[in-house]
Image: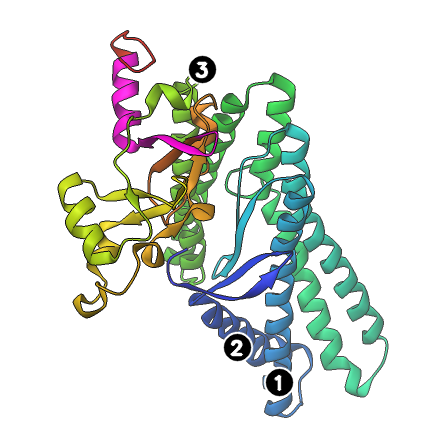
Amino acid sequence: MNGSVRVGQVAGVPLRMHWSVPLLVVMFAYGLGRQALPAWTPGRPEAVYALAGVVGAALLTGSLLLHETAHAATARRKQISVEDVTLWALGGMTRMGRPQTAAAAFAVAVSGPLTSLLVGGVALGAGIGLAQLTGWAEVPAVVLMWLGWANLFLGVFNLLPAVPLDGGRVVQAVLWWRTGDRERADLAASRSGQVLAVLLVAGGWISVLRGAPGGLWIVFVGLFVMVVAGAEHRRAALHTELRGLRVADAMTAPVTSGADWLSVQRFIDEVAVPAHHSALPLLDFEGRPSGLVQLRRLAAVPPAERETLRVREVAVPLSQCAVAAPEEELGEAIDRIGLRTGPRILVVDGGHLVGIVTAKDITRLLRRRTLGGSGGQG
């Protein structure tokens, strides 16, 4: 996600934090320390409220992380690749590959909400227990109960049957299991997400018009759901169109590539400029693919460093590129595309680069299929 930085690792995958997380913590801390606590436990020093607000906000942020960690850990147990976990203003996001079975998809989807419900129940129970005491325990008890109710709300809200919420993923998994048709299940779940988004935006605006500024937050959530659900719907529709097609049907071959040991300047002069492509695969000394370099990355290298810097040092390594075999399903290969390399798939057979698939290749293939032409290369 743009605007996020890596801050560590969780469940064996990179943990990233968006710039909006500190803002989220401040909002939680203010709401708890300046509004909830003074109303529920009046008569305490402001410093106590402030400290308790910060602690409560930190605990809630930690519980959001636990929610996403559950998704990541479950995905890894189900042999699903996980790219990273990102915390941001609306909670969190775990980027991962597509599950290969409905059972795996269901397990990953429910793991997050169940974790939130468990944390909420434990925190609420602990808070109720502390509330039986007096004196110093009153403020921690309120913080724990606030944390508990927040997690219970998070768990229940995420179970709403609409993509991109976890409940939408549950619907996808169940429909996939019942019908045996993943794309049909994806389309149904994405439509439910679009319906929920409209309801959230409408409800939020009604709240704002009635004098509740908090409705703007509901509008923001609704718009986010609308964008993601729309993207999911387009992706599901694309998978439906690509059904039955293989990577070899779309790939361009042969591929213009360059040696990864060349200097940046030599690569620009001998390979990049004559090729007229925005990105080029790289080959190592043994002729095996080693990564992908984009022209914008080459242009960003200061002229003084271009003679000494190797092109592989500014390239995206093969481990972070979308790679597929010629006989793989094209729809499955597309799901591996990441932001770093753009819409490009390196086609590798027997350890050697045999082709490349770009967005233009896919568009051309779909147009040819619409016209009734052959699915393969002509």
Relative side of 110 to 97, left or right? right
Residue placed furthest toward the top: 372
- Frontmost residue, 142 versus 106: 106
Alpha-carbon span between mark 1 and mark 2: 10 Å
Q: Secondary structure at mark 3?
A: loop
- Nearer mark to the viewer, of 2 and 3: 3
The residue that disc 1 covers is 51
Q: Amino acid at mark 2?
A: Tyr
Relative side of 244 to 62, left or right? left
Alpha-carbon span between mark 1 and mark 3: 59 Å
The residue that disc 3 covers is 244
Q: Secondary structure at mark 1?
A: helix
The vertical placement of 40 against 90, above or below, is below
Q: Quadrant of residue 288?
A: top left
The residue positioned 30% from the left and 49% from the top of the image is 293
The vertical placement of 224 against 134, above or below, is above
Q: Secondary structure at mark 2?
A: helix
Q: Amino acid at mark 3?
A: Gly
- Residue 119 visible, this angle: yes
Question: Residue 93 location, x and y as percent?
Answer: 52, 52
Going from N to C along the chain, the mark reached first, 1 or 3, is: 1
Question: Residue 333 location, x and y as percent?
Answer: 45, 31
* Magenta stretch in the rendered image: 349-369
Find out whether residue 363 is within the magenta segment.
Answer: yes
Question: Residue 262 location, x and y as percent?
Answer: 28, 53
Viewport quadrant of the C terminus: top left
Alpha-carbon span between mark 2 and mark 3: 54 Å
Residue 30: numbered disc: 2
Q: Residues within 10 Å of mark 3 (few under 14, many from 20)?
A: few
The residue positioned 63% from the left and 48% from the top of the image is 71
